[in-house]
Image (tube, rainbow, N blue to C red):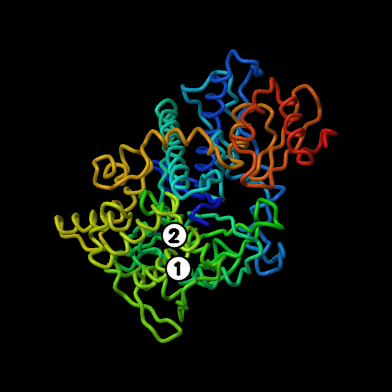
Amino acid sequence: MSVRRVMGSETEFGVLAVGEPQANATVLSTRVVTGYALRVAGELSREQSGSHSSHGQPHVGTGWDYGSESPLSDARGYTMSRDRAHPSQLTDRAPVLTAEEIAAETITESAMYTEDMDWRKVIMNTVIPNGARVYVDHSHPEYSSPEVTTPLDALTWDAAGDVVAARAVADLARGAENTGTPAVNLYKNNTDNKSVSYGAHENYVVDRAVAFDRIAAALLPFFATRQIMCGAGRVGLGVDGFQPGFQLSQRADFFERTVGLETTIHRPIVNTRDEPHADDTKYRRLHVIIGDANLSHTATLLKFGTTSLVLNLIEHDRVPTVDLVDPVAALQTVSHDPTVTATVALRDGRELSAVDIQREYHRAAVGLERELAPDGLDRDTHQVLELWDQVLSDLAQDPTLLADRLDWAAKYALLTAYRQRDGMAWDDPRLIAIDLQYADVRPEKGLYHRLAAAGRIRTLVDTQTIERAADRPPEDTRAWFRGTAVRRFPSAMVSVGWDSVNVEFPGIRRGARIGMPEPLDLTREITGEWFDAPDVEQWVHRVAEHRPGTVTGTGIN
């Protein structure tokens, strides 16, 4: 055992039209996704120019395979009826623009694309060559990262989503210069400070044999307190942010219950969606909605790494006993205390701080991992355990020591400096503007990016590696197969999902569905040579030959 497991992230970006605060957010999100799909299509067209690939108008977008989506399946053993479900929960069907949104939609030409592009095309869902999904999630553009196996890779491909977002913003800005339409800005944050919150989710593959009630019980104290490391920081208290102050987490005030299926209303600390996107007899996918959208490398690495280690504790029945009296109240108490000294009540009568509770989990994780690896920890596990220990020690000594590593601490230091210089109270609108600017995805504008470029926030992955990850998939999961298929045979992609690729054969009215039930199968090592096939049909035959039974729809079994 180690910190390694299949994991990934989902980021909904805040979206604004420059100079048009009342612009329709869904329309703006559609422009972002369509624009990026057009960018990818143009890049692949140029990349394949002169090869054996088909020519003509570039194929834009892949479509999404909704076949394995089951958002109303509950890990507690039942399925919610569609009649009871909030519309936002019905993510198993394609989004549709309303008549009003269609009337408002205008996709404009950008000079960077070829003249034969169909600029009227509207894309709300696509898979890009790094294996990620880019789509419109209600009123936000979302980047869902490809599956990875380490926290460091989770950080890398999560940050790659920020690159995707920044590219989309830059492309739309160039289009705005040519057409006069408003530019669109994106922000990696979690609230508009007007009582609306949007998510930054995590996903982890967990052994199906582990009872979900054990998972939930163990995660409640951990999730209520890990924000001392992983909070993004926020000006304002309460869902509307009207109460003056600063808190650790952008999401904490929006949670109302401990466990539940919903994600946008009555938000639970532990989400029960049972949608594995894999062999459901072997795996469950833990869908985590409690986290903030992080820019800090240290915070992101710890978010994924510590959660994976706690899942190890659960799977080995080694969870420390820290049962909170009221997890929701504890979540908000911890968030509202930048000194990280506030205590919360446990059912055994103790009062512990968030640092104390995280230290309990850290000690248990160290003990288990050393027991399971007596000859020494692997590099990834060692990195997470050491960083976890360092951050907890610094938080206990003086939280300001973390201004060079954690989002909330960096933001708090920045805002405090402005307050001291200009005599601003916590409800000063200028502080809210600075809070938002921290999350701006544009490298030249976002305060996080400027601090990192100046060396005032430590990074763990270099810029070139992150830029490359925006275009290339991880090599050790099925994301390699998905992303490489999109790159190699873009015009054949009918729809793509986490566990499927659906293709059509050019000139023939039939195609194939390739199932991908194993997240650790179809890696570069396994499938790299398969993509040397001269066309998509022969490639499908190779897949069927090596993975009998996974290809359907062609008569190949």
| Label 2: which secondary element | helix
Nearer to us in this view, 312 or 226: 312
Determine which quarter of the picture holds residue 233.
Answer: bottom left
Whichever of callouts 2 and 1 sits on the residue coming sooner in the sequence is 1
Going 85% across and 34% down the picture, which residue do you hit? 555
Task: Judge left or right: residue 422 versus residue 92.
Answer: left
Instruction: Please name the amino acid that badge 2 sits on.
Output: Thr
Q: Position of residue 364 (x, y in %)?
A: 44, 68
Which quadrant is home to the C terminus? Answer: top right
- Can the viewer see residue 294? yes
Which residue does the image show at 63% across and 58% down from the upper left?
284
- What residue is rendered at 67% in x and 51% in y? 278
Whether residue 542 is situated above or below residue 317 in the rendered picture: above
Asked which secondary structure carries label 1, the reply is: helix
How far across and down, in percent of the image, does residue 402 sit?
A: 27, 57
The one of 388 and 504 positioned closer to us in this rendering: 388
For residue 222, the mark is: 1
> Could you classify mark 2 by the number of other residues whose Cα lies within 10 Å: few (under 14), some (14-19), or many (20 or more)?
many
Looking at the image, is mark 2 or mark 1 nearer the viewer? Answer: 2
On the image, which quarter does residue 430 sit in?
Answer: bottom left
